[in-house]
Amino acid sequence: MNQSNPSNILFPDKWVDNYADYLFNYAIARVNNSNVAKDLVQETFFAGLKSAKNFEGKSSERTWLISILKRKIIDYYRKINSKKGQAEIRMNFYDSGDNKGNWIEERVPQSWNNEAEKNIENEELKNQLDKCIDSLPEKYAMVFKMKTIQQFETEDICKELNITPSNLWVMIHRARTQLRNCMEQNWFNK
């Protein structure tokens, strides 16, 4: 696999074969959604083609493409955090099976009006979620709580647990997958 390019010549016809898997793995670790990751890689290749004339050969093709992908990931998060972007976000609620589908965020079903029922439902949901978190491997549970519940910064978690950001995102992805499965089995399919 050609990972370095000593000159300022690009070989876009080789990008998919040489870099697609690497770029996809890089993206999926950061966005936790395979469809979004695929789209970001495609956008990266497209942006690379559009800006190929600006490539100076100071880095390898792969490094250059990763820098483009990083900007695409940042743009993705900016979009989903903007008001307009939030209205366009499709929220996945099942990946497979008869219930496969997603919602546009602004059309997600709203809460019930009955406060008492809602409070009971929220308490039961919280209890089940706590049970599911407790069933995670210890390190997954710790990382998930620190990042998602306590909202620690990535660097702080990595420093505290002596792990890399890549390891952190893999653990969070695995924790979320296990939590989703646990909640589907013990809450949503009651």
Image: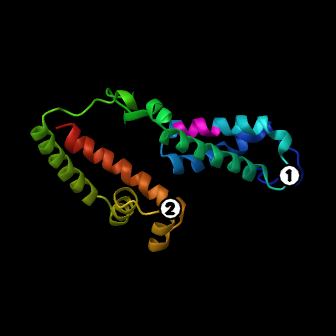
Residue 76, image x and y in percent? 56, 41
Residue 97, image x and y in percent? 34, 30
Image quadrant assignment for residue 13? top right
- Assess whether residue 37 is covered by the magenta stretch: yes
Tally of numbered tags: 2
Can residue 101 be seen?
Answer: no
In the image, farthest residue toward the left = 116
C-alpha span from label 2 to label 1: 30 Å
Nearest to the observer: residue 165 or residue 190: 165
Image quadrant assignment for residue 111? top left
Quarter of the C terminus within the rendering: top left
Q: Residue placed at 28% from the left, 57% from the top?
A: 133
Q: Which residues are magenta?
A: 36-41
Position of 16 with respect to 140 (left or right) is right
Image quadrant assignment for residue 98? top left
Q: Nearer the viewer, mark 2 or mark 1?
A: 1
Q: Residue placed at 48% from the left, 56% from the top?
A: 169
Q: Amino acid at mark 1?
A: Gly
Can residue 76 be seen?
Answer: yes
Residue 145, image x and y in percent? 34, 60
Q: Which mark is residue 57?
A: 1
- Assess whether residue 162 is covered by the magenta stretch: no
Q: Residue placed at 75% from the left, 39% from the top?
A: 48
Could you tell me which secondary element the residue under label 2 belongs to? helix
Could you tell me which secondary element the residue under label 1 belongs to? loop
Q: Residue placed at 86% from the left, 40% from the top?
A: 53
Q: Amino acid at mark 2?
A: Asn
Position of 117 with respect to 171 (left or right) is left
Q: Sequence-wise, which precedes: disc 2 or disc 1? A: 1
Residue 30, image x and y in percent? 53, 50
Mark 1: few/some/many CA within 10 Å (<14, 14-19, 20+): some
Q: Which residue is mark 2?
A: 167
